[in-house]
Amino acid sequence: MNIIIDGRPLVFDGRPTILEVAKANGILIPSLCEHPALEPYGACRLCLVEVKDRRGYMPACTTFAEEGLEVRTDSPELKSLRRGILELILAEHPHACLVCDEKSSCDDYKSTIRKTGEPTGCVLCSANGRCQLQKAVEAVGLERVPYPALRREGEVRRDDPFIDRDNSLCILCGRCVRICSEVRGASVLTFVARGSETVIGTAMDRRLVDSGCRFCGACVDVCPTGSLADRSVRYERLPDSEVKALCPFCAQGCRLKIGLWDGRVVETLPDPEGPANRGQACVKGRFLVKTAVGHPRRLLRPMVRRDGRLEAASWDEALNAAAAGLKALGDGQIAVTASAQSSCEDLFALHRFAADILKARSIAGPWEGSAAGALRAHGRRTGQSLALNFQMADIGRAGTIVVFEEDLPETQPIVGVEVTRAVRNGATLVHIGTEALGASSRAALRAALPAGKGQALLKSLAAAVRKVRGAAVKIDGPKKLRSLGLTRGTLLDIAQALETRKPAFYLVGPAFLGAFGGRSALVELLNLAALTDGRVIPLDGEANGRGGLEIAGAFPVETASRRKVRAFYLAGPSPKLEPGAAGFVVFQGSYEDENTAAADVVLPEATSFETEGTFVNVEGRVQLTGPALEPAGEARPGWRILADLAARMDRAEILPSSGGDARKDLARTVAAFGGLAMAALPDQGLVLHEEPAWPGAVTDAPLTARAAASAGAAPRDPDDYKGLNLALENKSLKLVRGRRCPRS
Amino acid sequence: MKHHRTHLLVCAGTGCVSCGAFTLKEALEKEVAGRGLQDEVLVVATGCNGFCERGPIVVVHPEGIFYQRLTPEDVPFLVEEHLVKGRPVQKFMYVPPAEAKPVPKMTDIDFFKHQRLIVLRNRGRIDPEKIEEYIAYDGYEAMAKALTEMTPEGIIAEISASGLRGRGGAGFPTGRKWALCRREKAEPKYIICNGDEGDPGAFMDRSVLEADPHAVVEGMVIGARAIGAEKGFLYIRDEYPLAVQRMGVALGQARELGLLGKDILGTGFDFDLEIVRGAGAFVSGEETALIASIEGQRAYPRQRPPYPAEHGLWGRPTVINNVETWANVPSIISRGAAWFAGLGTGTSKGTKVFSLVGKINNTGLVEVPMGIRLREIVYGIGGGIPGGREFKAIQIGGPSGGCVPRDLLDLPVDYESLTKAGAMMGSGGMIVMDEDTCMVDIALYFLRFTEEESCGKCAPCRLGTRQMAGILARIAGGQGTDDDLRKLEELALTVKQGALCGLGQTAPNPVLSTLRYFRDEYEAHIRERRCPAKVCKNLITYDIEPDKCVGCLLCLKACPVNAITGERKQVHVIDQAACIKCGACMNICPPKVGAVSKHSGEGGRS
């Protein structure tokens, strides 16, 4: 379709706003309240344009482009109107620096002096250099503000974790309020008072942390000024470079923009172009990368046990010691653990190493206890092909969403964003869980059932769906239903939603199996999904759980040996080993944990920020990341450690000698990656193959009791990153986790 | 039904109630019963008569004798004389200003004589809490006609042909609005009655809701049928408890009689109404903000288009009309579009209700045909300015409106003329101002109002009204500069063109219209530091004229800040540095002495 803006004939598709068309064609219309993630709002009035044959001026951000529309963005009247509005906005914002005569020389010679509690000018503000008000002033060409400066009353609020709030810098564009409710579904921030008294605040003026905030940081990211600021950045320099990296803290596959100064992390922001997260992140990715990469418990140097004590050693010494210890053992005498937070390259190398070189007794990873693993295993047992892949956007288009047990903002924040989208589009959200969870606060229908009653509840639901359809089915009596945590009315409402609002999605995480009664509950759930034409979507928590599941499946443990396990190669979580009791222990990891002390050799591994690697997120999307930073200390990529080790065990040819090689091998060896262009992963990532008929053997291979226990033992803490518990390490996160929103 | 020879119609509108109408009614009932007249005389509480200035009011039916400003003490005498002896009591009757002879009959009083009642047709004659009385005056006949004899398209055609325009202010053609909404495919559709009347000094909607709630209900059922809605909302501000209560009673009675709810009149048409009480923000009267408020959101307006007719309540097609608009609908349906279109001017049809307040003799609520001259309202109905003062201006349309000066007294009252004159119809507030009113002060008053009531969403309104009020305060305080006038005009334009909703777009009108007609007053404030009306405190001084002062100590005692010194029988003197210009001295100085005078201008005297 065609539109004319400032005399230029332009073409557009779909239903963009005038502002979007202009932007796409390089026509600058200043705007402050508009944001691509938010619905049209039209409050700042800077983007007013003239539309031929329409009365008055229209905001370009709320007016949709139409065939044949003629728009002017730069008439003298508009320019003067825009200037008038911007002057008014600046009258209530510290503007001395914006209209200062010395501005240009100041920009050139002075860096931002941010160590101030209350910014009274740009050079004192944490947003200096990226403030959109500065850009608007430049675009409009403002040189003076003809009003007395007014400072909004109130102090800078610094009583929350992570985020500072300074209302004196706020221009009331409402982006924070809107992203908090429209996108994140939290509705923590709100407008308080009216007219010129209006400020951004919370209900009853409480702290964010007491208002149900999960500190996703979205409000800070959309704030056009420095009003909402990441406290840790307030006193930092502006980054001198930016790199992109995947967040390894959970399975959403968020891409982050990491701002560096002299190679050091200054801040991390969600990447608006991130294919999975599209500009959103959560508290961990947004605020805790710094904590993780520079943590004092990082393993920086290889260590070798000498005379009963672990001592720093060179890589050669450590690798030789490890190779010597492992080489001495025979088939089936070594148990290996793997981490679902390692990259595909690392996991591929580890499995190959374990299977072909160590001839390990077991390679234990968290695959069996994962939701995807359970679904796959069930599919294979029953000969069905159960899809594991999905797209985030599918969830946003759901009619009914049933969430089991998960606290989405914490464990699946981006899925949570899509659930919010679906609810805004009219979907019914049902929350079935055993805990008081925040995600349920938006749920229209809820059940709080006692542990282990999942199967019974799912059966009741299926009966209720049949009843809603008109079948002569008896549903459970009130007493029975009460024991399942809901009323007859709620049961029928859920059934009604499942029956009438399609498609239905059932979101299950690993907690589902534990809390709902294991495999039998899964069978009931799949039956219910089949009955309602719905889909069961497995939501696992770890960054590469899905990739690991596929890789582990390609390396069936075939040893028949029943010899005693004499050594451990720990590259993932393991139950605590007693020093000396476990034989020979090699520890490959990034952080010191309870098993480091039991190790004979410690091999420091780079984090995912420091090396190149592919991760498969919860959708089944394969994405390549890093390296964003130099490895800390002497840490090395996992695959490289293993390759070096293999070389010292005279089997160098078996392991890939680079990340690229590892990806090529992956595409050759592991069916789910088969034929994927792993050598050149596109920006959007690639989607794993779903295998209708799995060629490999069933993965329920016999494990040693100990290794089995290590795999699915205690439910994984979502704040654990390679043995470093972020919530325990960071006071702020601990505070946030301690105040989960009670069920409302 | 019992027959009574006489009805005592006690006005129970909010104005009369606050003057003790209910106590009066009790006294009347007691007195009537005490004399054993209860089977002959019925005491009825009616809706507002409109002549609030004269409350409490009792009209004796069927003679139409109008008694005013009654107290319970007057009751025995009134009952004795009028009801027992049959002699109307002259001393309780209305005496027009500057005349000596009372006017006994309501219909002969100037205030009522010039009015033309459509919306207020039932005022003062029915008990608003009795549906039977509404029905007795042909109530719900129009609804029956619409539901049984007319198609939805037919109803819309009739409303369109009548030329009815929205009475909430902007004057959008009602029929067209309905047609737009009917055309929409989305279901369900909603209709809303906007009863969030917030203009200072305006009480038209309140009065209609209190005096004749069924007229609104009937209009809404007809509207619902026309656009195909099953559910409607009456948004009434909670500051109108009587309106909320009477509407609640009306809805209950209508449901009971099958005039509301399922299967209305057996026609198979379902429609029900719900009252939503507003929390008092002025901006809630803006239609999109009102819709947000019903939805439970903060009352923030949103950009139109899309208009509520396409995207309204919960995103559904919605017709939202003002109380007065709805109350017009039944009459149009029952008497026909041609009859309605026969009233008024070329573009403005029918009547309009105004609340006439300020410096005027007959304060109250009036319904006049469109096109009537302002002069007729001010002098004909309003009885002119009290105290022999000069008429200066009339503020029409509340904070969104403007001041119309004396030269334009012959302006016809219709949508276009008022807008052209810099005012607007608004919801129908008229504030009359005399020569003692300072126009800078008036503009400041309204700008402070809009600044406070601006919702804060869009920048021009939130910030612009604040800056304008600041400049006006500066001028009123005697610190204005010529540049301030230029700035004011610039700002006014920025806000008018830039603001998101009607509140902001019209907020500068009081400034623009006073600047247009009374620029000299602004200039006097700025250049001469003089307030011609002697209102702006910073620019006036009070003086005691030595040759007139008798030294009575009255003013000295009245002064709250002890700024006056003097001895008995000696001339008193005001200490100008201490004086707070409250005017207490001037008020207390006996008129025959008249020693205190007020001055404004350089040198303290002018």
Image (spheres, rainbow, N blue to C red):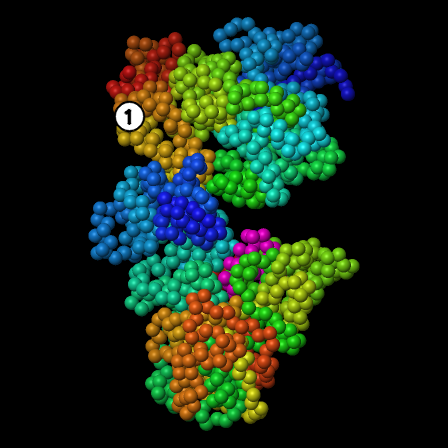
What is the quadrant of residue A376 in the picture? bottom right
User: Which amino acid type is marked by label 1?
Assistant: Ile
Asked if residue A622 is positioned above or below residue A323 in the image, the reply reads: above
Image x and y of residue B471, in percent: 33, 32
Q: Which residues are magenta?
A: A410-437
Chain assignment, label 1: B
Q: Nearer the viewer, residue B162 or A46?
A: B162
Would you say B3 lies left or right of A36 here?
Answer: right
Image x and y of residue B370, in percent: 53, 20
Circle 1 residue: B526
Residue that lies at the very extreme toward the top in this rendered image: B101
Q: Quadrant of the C terminus of chain B?
A: top left
Would you say B414 lies left or right of A636 here?
Answer: right
Q: Quadrant of the N terminus of chain B?
A: top right
What is the quadrant of residue B187 in the picture? top right
Picture residue at 69% right of the left edge, 21% below the top: B137
Q: Is residue A285 visible?
A: no
What is the quadrant of residue A656 in the picture? bottom left
Would you say B89 lies left or right of B519 here?
Answer: right
Q: Is residue A420 magenta?
A: yes
Labels in figure, total: 1
Picture residue at 47% right of the left edge, 89% below the top: A357
Picture residue at 44% right of the left edge, 63% below the top: A274
